[in-house]
Image (cartoon, rainbow, N blue to C red):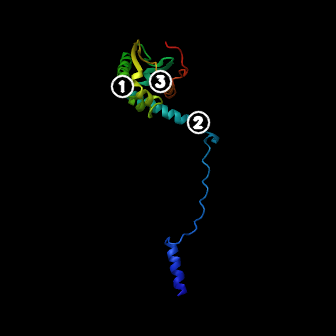
Amino acid sequence: MNTFMATAILAVSMAGGIAQEKPAPQDKPAPHDMASCPMHEQHEAAAQDEHHQGVVERGDEVMGFSHEKATHHFFLYADGGAIDVQSNSAEDTATRDAIRSHFTHIVKMFAAGDFNAPMLIHGQNPPGTETMKRLKEQIQYRLESTDRGGRIRITTKNAEALQAVHSFLRFQIADHQTGDSKEVVPAA
């Protein structure tokens, strides 16, 4: 009978009826320190190049003109800023007209608080857009035609909206890799 009882107790304990001691979990190895990788900068540069290539490809599709045929600039002013795109060639009227057409749509979209185009181009919601949506009545967007393209002049007297516009434009400078200054200058 003792053998029977011992077997029954063992069976119940194996079925989970009696708590068993579990081995202590092993410590997970520390995550690899990317900065210590001898090729960290190359990996980071490759990832940035891949992201930028995606911005260019998506941008060409969304905007309707090639990044190779136009130059983007973003400016931060004390009262807002500007988005400026110019055809690289004075003779390329197709690109000039496509820039103007795109900007006509963008001015209407931004004024309505619609920032889907930048989100589609950049693959993320650019900083500042949520505030720009919320304060859309406090921000003005004016389209200006230029010889080779166009400019969207963004102005506001609202301090919170101004901060959001500057965040948005700084992001554009970085993501489009324009090299433009991220410093605020007097209005042009």
Q: Give whichever of discs 1 and 2 has the lower sequence position.
A: 2
Give me the C-alpha separation between circle 1 and circle 2.
Answer: 41 Å
Q: Residues within 10 Å of mark 2 (few under 14, many from 20)?
A: few
On the image, numbered disc 2 is attached to which residue?
Answer: 42
Residue closest to the eye, 52 or 188: 188
On the image, numbered disc 3 is attached to which residue?
Answer: 165
On the image, numbered disc 1 is attached to which residue?
Answer: 112
Q: Position of residue 107 (x, y in %)?
A: 37, 21
Q: Where 17 sits versus 27, above or below?
A: below
Q: How many marks?
A: 3
Amino acid type at image mark 1: Ala
Q: Position of residue 148 (x, y in %)?
A: 41, 14
Mark sitting on residue 30: none
Q: Are marks 1 and 2 in contact (CB under 8 Å)?
A: no
Q: Where 58 sits versus 17, above or below?
A: above
Residue at (50% x, 24% y) in the render: 163
| Displayed quadrant of residue 140 | top left
Residue at (40% x, 19% y) in the render: 141
Amino acid type at image mark 3: Val
Q: Give whichever of discs 3 and 1 has the lower sequence position.
A: 1
Label 1 element class: loop
Q: Residues within 10 Å of mark 1 (few under 14, many from 20)?
A: few
User: In the visual, does 20 lie left or right of 91?
Assistant: right
Label 2 element class: helix
Q: Give whichever of discs 3 and 2 has the lower sequence position.
A: 2
Give me the C-alpha separation between circle 3 and circle 2.
Answer: 32 Å
Mark yes or no: residue 6 visible: yes
| Displayed quadrant of residue 39 | top right
Q: Position of residue 6 (x, y in %)?
A: 54, 81
Residue at (46% x, 18% y) in the render: 157
Amino acid type at image mark 2: Gln
Give me the C-alpha separation between circle 3 and circle 1.
Answer: 15 Å
